[in-house]
Image: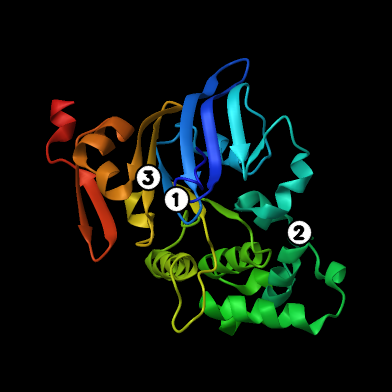
């Protein structure tokens, strides 16, 4: 019986014993994992856990060395990945570094629908500018719409890039440590924007991101709208499921290798090492 026949949401991501190996290391080791439409996942793990490697698989930018990876119902290695790329939106530093810094924020967003890096590709269609401005407004960046990207703060640039990714109406939004390097105001503005994008906005406006995966190694950077968690350690899953079941002292200990205290406040998560852990490790 199919997932749809059982009344479950369609599978967006399906990994079965997926591994990624290089001549020197195993980056992901026999990872099995599923993401269904409408879920919002956070992938947690220390440096070197395999988080960025996993995102490269989910963005169809890398093939597994072994096992099976299916994205949007298509198996990597048996599909023209160019047909998947428009449906998979990756927000990361590599994209940001390739956009001309003097491009106006509204024009950066306009390029999202085509994947171009310069606005000349878009011509002069006014409707694309209207959509771009609305996306910036919903992510709290309407004030910077007519400013060059280089004049925006790091947090504003991240939100502009997320708006750019959403302009393509992707089936899966992928974010690689979006809050890295942000100060507290920048982080809080970013998380508010992500929560707005994955939740239902005021009135009848639908969610902007139907399904998402965020990679981080700080639980404080998890949006309150996150529904599920994958815990990685040394390229292996040490837990995957609803966020309330995963973000426990036991789960985070297995993930980060130290005793952790964790609590939730108004939908947001906070964690710290247990007192005295260094002297008992």
| Visible residue check, residue 48 | no
Indicate the quadrant where residue 159 lies.
bottom right
Given this view, does label 2 or label 3 mark the residue nearer the observer? 3
| Visible residue check, residue 279 | yes
Q: Is residue 27 left or right of residue 76?
A: left
Residue hosting label 1:
7
- The secondary structure type at the circle numbered 3 is strand
Q: Is residue 281 above or below residue 246?
A: above
Q: Earlier in the sequence, mark 2 or mark 3?
A: 2
Quarter of the image containing the C terminus?
Answer: top left
At horizontal 52% and vertical 40% (from top left) the residue drawn is 2
- The secondary structure type at the circle numbered 1 is loop
Given this view, does label 1 or label 2 mark the residue nearer the observer? 1
Q: Is residue 187 left or right of residue 134?
A: left
Q: Are marks 2 and 3 in contact (CB under 8 Å)?
A: no
Q: Earlier in the sequence, mark 1 or mark 2?
A: 1
Q: Residues within 10 Å of mark 2 (few under 14, many from 20)?
A: some
Q: Is residue 248 left or right of residue 233?
A: left
Residue hosting label 3:
229
Q: Disc 2 and disc 3: Cα gap in Å?
A: 29 Å
Q: Disc 1 and disc 2: Cα gap in Å?
A: 34 Å
**Could you say which disc has been placed on residue 115 in the image?**
2
Q: Disc 3 and disc 1: Cα gap in Å?
A: 22 Å
Residue 193: image x %, image y %? Answer: 47, 70
Indicate the quadrant where residue 119 lies.
bottom right
- The secondary structure type at the circle numbered 2 is loop
Q: Earlier in the sequence, mark 3 or mark 1?
A: 1
Residue 274: image x %, image y %? Answer: 15, 40
Residue 104: image x %, image y %? Answer: 72, 75
Residue 51: image x %, image y %? Answer: 49, 38
**Could you say which disc has been placed on residue 225 in the image?**
none
């Amino acid at each position: 019986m199919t997932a749809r026949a059982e009344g479950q949401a369609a599978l967006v991501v399906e990994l079965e014993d997926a591994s990624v190996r290089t001549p020197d290391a195993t980056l992901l080791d026999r990872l099995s994992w599923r993401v269904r439409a409408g879920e919002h996942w956070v992938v947690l793990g220390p440096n070197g856990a395999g988080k960025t490697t996993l995102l490269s698989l989910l963005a169809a930018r890398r093939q597994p060395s072994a096992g099976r990876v299916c994205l949007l119902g298509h198996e990597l290695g048996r599909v023209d990945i160019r047909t998947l790329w428009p449906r998979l939106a990756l927000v990361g530093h590599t994209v940001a570094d390739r956009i001309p810094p003097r491009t106006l924020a509204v024009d950066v967003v306009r390029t999202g629908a085509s994947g171009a890096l310069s606005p000349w590709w878009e011509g002069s269609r006014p409707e694309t500018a209207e959509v771009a401005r609305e996306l910036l407004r919903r992510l709290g960046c309407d004030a910077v719409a007519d400013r060059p990207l280089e004049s925006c703060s790091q947090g504003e640039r991240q939100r502009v890039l997320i708006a750019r990714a959403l302009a393509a109406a992707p089936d899966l939004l992928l974010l690689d440590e979006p809050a890295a390097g942000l100060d507290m105001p920048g982080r809080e503005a970013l998380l508010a924007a992500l929560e707005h994008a994955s939740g239902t906005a005021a009135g009848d406006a639908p969610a902007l991101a139907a399904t998402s995966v965020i990679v981080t190694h700080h639980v404080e950077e998890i949006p309150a709208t996150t529904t599920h968690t994958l815990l990685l350690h040394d390229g292996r899953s040490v837990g995957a499921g609803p966020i309330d079941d995963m973000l426990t002292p036991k789960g985070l200990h297995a993930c980060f290798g130290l005793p952790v205290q964790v609590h939730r406040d108004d939908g947001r998560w906070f964690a710290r090492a247990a007192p005295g852990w260094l002297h008992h490790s």
